[in-house]
Amino acid sequence: MAAETLSGAKLYSINESAMLEYNVVHSADVSEAKIVDKTGNGIDTVAKLKDIMGVPDAPAAVLSTDIGERTLGKAVIADLTIDDSGKIANIIVTKVRTRPVVGISWKSDKIGSDYKGFAEAFERNGAFAVFLPQVKSAEEAKEVLSKINGLFETGGEDWNPALYGEKQTPHGSSGWNDARDTSDISLMQQAVAMDVPLLAVCRGEQGFNVAMGGGLIQDVPYYLGQKVLAGEIDASRVTGVLKDTGYRKWNEATQTYDKVSCEDEPHYRVQIDGLIHSGGTGYHNLKSGDNIGILTGSKWLYDIIGDTSIDLVATAHHQAIDPQKLGKGLTIAAYSSDGIVEAIEHRDSLFALAVQWHPERDALKDTRGVDVDQDLCNAVLGALVKYAGTHADGPASHSSSSSGCNAGAAAGLMALLAMPLFFYVKKKR
């Protein structure tokens, strides 16, 4: 292999075989490396570098904002020279910092393997991760957010359509979790008000729009089918028609779901351009073109990805943001070719980005036997860690333009935050 130089590499650990793990998924022999420390921490040997990075461990699988006793040490950034044999020849340490704390939003009281993987990915990107407790009010959200530096909102169930003033549509929202809806919306609203950096994915992206007063497309295939029938999308672009086997409809009287058969009058639910927006787990491209792909005018996303397209994004959703019902202060940062919103930003925040896909799914490895670009996945997660670090450094480290906008953002949120969140009776399912 040819020699190369990597600038700004994120160092994680050095194992017993003298392999340095860096940039989340990469490693190389560091046994003969020469080290130059530009940070004044006296890191001039591999042993001292290993000592300051500490021993990797996992966050406790408990709901808390406290990182607890950890053996994982400080985050280290360095420029690496890798020789033609694949070994690291030189390390120039450019930054050593205390890790900011990234909180992973509540899903249930049990911490699953998926959440443990998210935590490891954020820690390999330079943070400490914690699993946040459920919050039931704005005040509880403020208390939680006052103890962390960044918020990661995860994927999951559909959203209760009552939160954005609708009832269930054919094949629309079902199986929602009111306690989780309340927790997530409270956290996202207060994160914007308090200027705590935020990254939301899939359900989290949709909920960010709802939290800011926007609405959702309850079922993308049905929505696209109506577009085709109305002549707004050319029928030649239909690449799949989903068989209508019926759906679950919420019954207010019985507080349970009824099965609705659609055999006699099936709904026209379609896929456009080969893109999958019908639940499950899969991948699709995010092509660039006229007002599609990643928009170059986005505040953060284009700079993070470095391009207007992505070959593969992990997808697992049937709901999406309604572009005609965009929340207050939000701008669209990416569209797929069928017109579905793939990313939004709250530009007046220090950092508030939400994407419809799942960069966290393959951040550590390919999970579905598909060759996904892990570096691109981690570029998104790493952006949250970067701005969480800025938040940890305090208001003086924020740019003047961001600080000026934050006051306006907080004022603009007052009406939203004054609205009570609904607390629903737990449903029987």
Image (tube, rainbow, N blue to C red):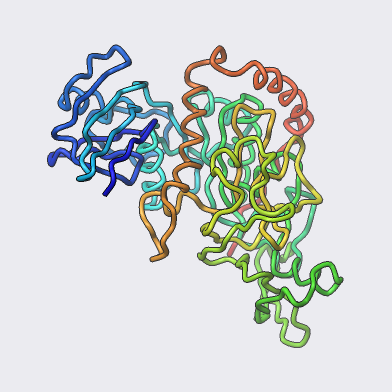
Percent position of residue 5, x then y: 33, 35
Q: Residue furthest right?
A: 230
Q: How many marks?
A: 0
Left or right: 146, with 58 as reference point? right
Q: Is residue 138 above or below residue 394?
A: below
Percent position of residue 414, x then y: 76, 27
The picture quadrant where one finds residue 290 is bottom right
Q: Residue furthest bottom?
A: 264
- Residue at 65% x, 55% y: name it: 288
Percent position of residue 258, x then y: 68, 73
Quadrant the C terminus occupies = bottom right
The picture quadrant where one finds residue 17 is top left
85 and 393: which one is in front? 85
Q: Is residue 281 above or below residue 396?
A: below
Left or right: 4, with 272 as reference point? left
Percent position of residue 386, x then y: 48, 30
306 and 376: which one is in front? 306
Left or right: 152, with 185 as reference point? left
- Residue at 84% x, 67% y: name it: 232
The picture quadrant where one finds residue 211 is top right
